Image (cartoon, rainbow, N blue to C red):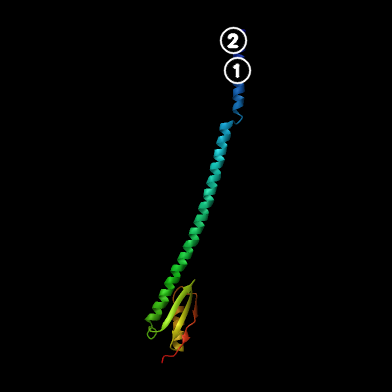
Amino acid sequence: MMQNQAKLLLVALLLGLGLSACDKPGPAENAGKKIDQAATDTGKKIGDAVDKVEKKVSEQGEKTSQVFDDTEITTKVKGAIFAEPGLKSLQISVDTIKGIVTLSGSVDSQDNHAKIQALAGAVQGVKKVVNQTVVMPSK
């Protein structure tokens, strides 16, 4: 009977030691923690990269929108000048950058010089008109 009790005591002691060892992290637990940390770090890096890409796409979208706006303004200014009687045959170039319209070329009178400036300024989206046209009376 003493022998059975000794065996039971030995088994209980071994079980107690085994259970106490479970509180200490082993290689598997350490590896799991490292994997979790790597996944967290990778997720953060991916999130940061996505934020950067979204910012770039947004900036490019704004630039593209500005180009379309400028093209639309240029088209409307040219249309207004072409539709105005007496200005159709004049040599006038229209360039728009960020809403600033630059007119260049030649006009046949000071009245037409002022008229194209007013027409360009009346187009929606025009912030400023730079009239570089030269008055050259017709022969």
32 or 106: which is nearer to us? 106
The picture places residue 21, in percent across and down from the top left corner, at 61, 26
42 or 65: which is nearer to us? 42
Q: Secondary structure at mark 1?
A: helix
Q: Which residue type does callout 1 highlight?
A: Ala
Residue at left 59%, top 27%?
Answer: 22
| Residue bearing mark 2 | 4
3 shown above or below 115: above
Q: Which residue type does callout 2 highlight?
A: Asn
The picture places residue 41, in percent across and down from the top left corner, at 56, 45
The picture places residue 111, in percent across and down from the top left corner, at 45, 88
The picture places residue 24, in percent across and down from the top left corner, at 61, 30
- The answer to which of marks 2 and 1 sits earlier in the sequence is 2
21 shown above or below 130: above
Q: Residue furthest front?
A: 139
Residue at left 46%, top 75%?
Answer: 95
Q: Is residue 133 left or right of residue 25?
A: left
| Residue bearing mark 1 | 12
98 shown above or below 136: above
Quadrant of the snapshot with the N terminus: top right
Image-quadrant location for residue 136: bottom left
93 or 77: which is nearer to us? 93
Q: CA distance from mark 2 to mark 1?
A: 12 Å
122 shown above or below 47: below
Image-quadrant location for residue 106: bottom left
Q: Which disc, if any, is residue 3?
A: none
Quadrant of the snapshot with the C terminus: bottom left
Within 10 Å of disc 1 (Cα), the crowding (few <14, some 14-19, many 20+) is few
Q: Residue furthest top?
A: 1
Q: Secondary structure at mark 2?
A: helix
Q: Residue furthest bottom?
A: 139
